[in-house]
Amino acid sequence: MAAATSTVPRSTPPVSSRGRTCSTVRPKASCGADVLVAGLSIPCRHAFVRRSGPPPGDAGSPEPRGFAVDAPAFLSRAGDGATIAYRRTEGRGPAASPTVVFLPGFRSDMEGGKALALEAWCRSEGRGFLRFDYTGHGLSSGAFEDGTIGQWAADAVFAIEALTAGPLVLVGSSMGGWIMMLAARALAERNGPDRVAPQWVAPQWVAGLVGVAPAPDFTEDLIMANASPALRRDLERDGVHYEPSDYSDEPTPITRRLIEDGRERLVLGAPFPFAGPVRIIQGMADPDVPWRHALRVADAFAGADVEILLVKSGDHRLSEPDDLARLVRMTGEVCRLVAKES
């Protein structure tokens, strides 16, 4: 990519500098109605408000207008006082396991079309499902510009350990593809090097992965590798660069802390120790994460059961009905493989 403006993995809707969702994205004409995906009725994301009340510690934020929905739950972390907003579906019956966990992208939240499609499918199957907002995103506490890859990965591990049990299939969108790899590694390390599924007796373990336009190492390979002189100057001088956004009047803050922390957490330079099934969906018309990056991601996994689905007309979001149907189908395939092995 020639310009830095095309190197930040983008997601909608954006969040403001306070970590709250902006209202600058205009809903499509079809919003407010359900969308049929793989035979399931998926609520359009723009029919939902982002909160029915402020999360703890952020009572001053305005309440957006929209249709009322059940309030999300909040998970409090003792160490730093952070609150993580989440929505959880309890599994039931023979298909309850594995639990599916959705990990959103950079400046995205848990109310996106992919998360809602997976949630609807999991409910129809009786399968457990978890979606949540990283700190500084959506309804969770904190400011977006204070966040780092390591912090958001820690948020994921915290939510997973507190809210799930048994085998897991992580689904990571864009930056969430990096987070899912870091979370899988962290959980494996906590559970001990001698435990191999399905013999693990740990409370939870990652048994399968699904990446949607996964963007591991994007801070180095997609931002800094294509950084403009202005971006480098601002990071050196001010510690932050504000990148114009196609989706919001507010620019995207890229901080020196984000870049430096990301540099400590790169995963594509050596074989990644994960042997479970991995499925990757990548758009070939993605302006933010080149489709060849998905090949690098696939090649990094040490296991043999890794498959990529390239969508020639697919963009970065991969949120059209056909895209969501593919996501549900591939997630179901990984869940069946995991259940068979378990």
Image (cartoon, grey):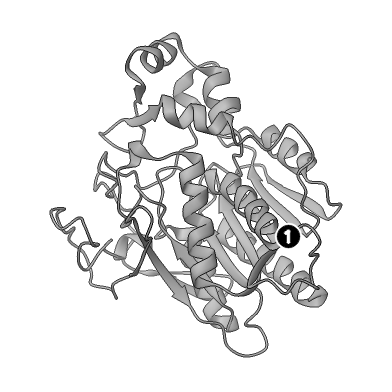
In the depicted structure, whether residue 129 falls above or below residue 229: below
Please indicate, yes or no, whether residue 133 appears anywhere in the rendered image.
yes
- Mark 1 surroundings: few (<14), some (14-19) or many (≥20) residues within 10 A: few
Which image quadrant is residue 209 in? bottom right
| Residue for point 60% across, 64% down | 325
- Nearer to me, 166 or 33: 166
In this view, the residue farthest toward the right is: 304
Query: Residue 55: where, in percent of width, then height?
Result: 25, 62
Instruction: Tell me the kind of residue under disc 1.
Output: Gly
Please indicate, yes or no, whether residue 321 appears anywhere in the rendered image.
no
Residue of label 1? 192
Query: Residue 22: where, in percent of width, then height?
Result: 26, 46
Residue 80 appears left or right of 315: left
Query: Residue 72: where, in percent of width, then height?
Result: 33, 70
| Residue for point 66% across, 78% down | 97
Residue 292 appears left or right of 5: right
In this view, the residue farthest toward the bottom is: 93
Residue 326 appears left or right of 226: right
Residue 326 appears left or right of 198: left
Which image quadrant is residue 54 in? bottom left
| Residue for point 46% across, 13% down | 228
Q: Secondary structure at mark 1?
A: loop
Query: Residue 161: where, in percent of width, then height?
Result: 54, 66
In the depicted structure, whether residue 201 falls above or below residue 290: below
In the depicted structure, whether residue 230 falls above or below residue 246: above
Which quarter of the rendered picture does the N terminus lie within?
A: top right
Which quarter of the rendered picture does the C terminus lie within?
A: bottom right
- Tag count in the figure? 1
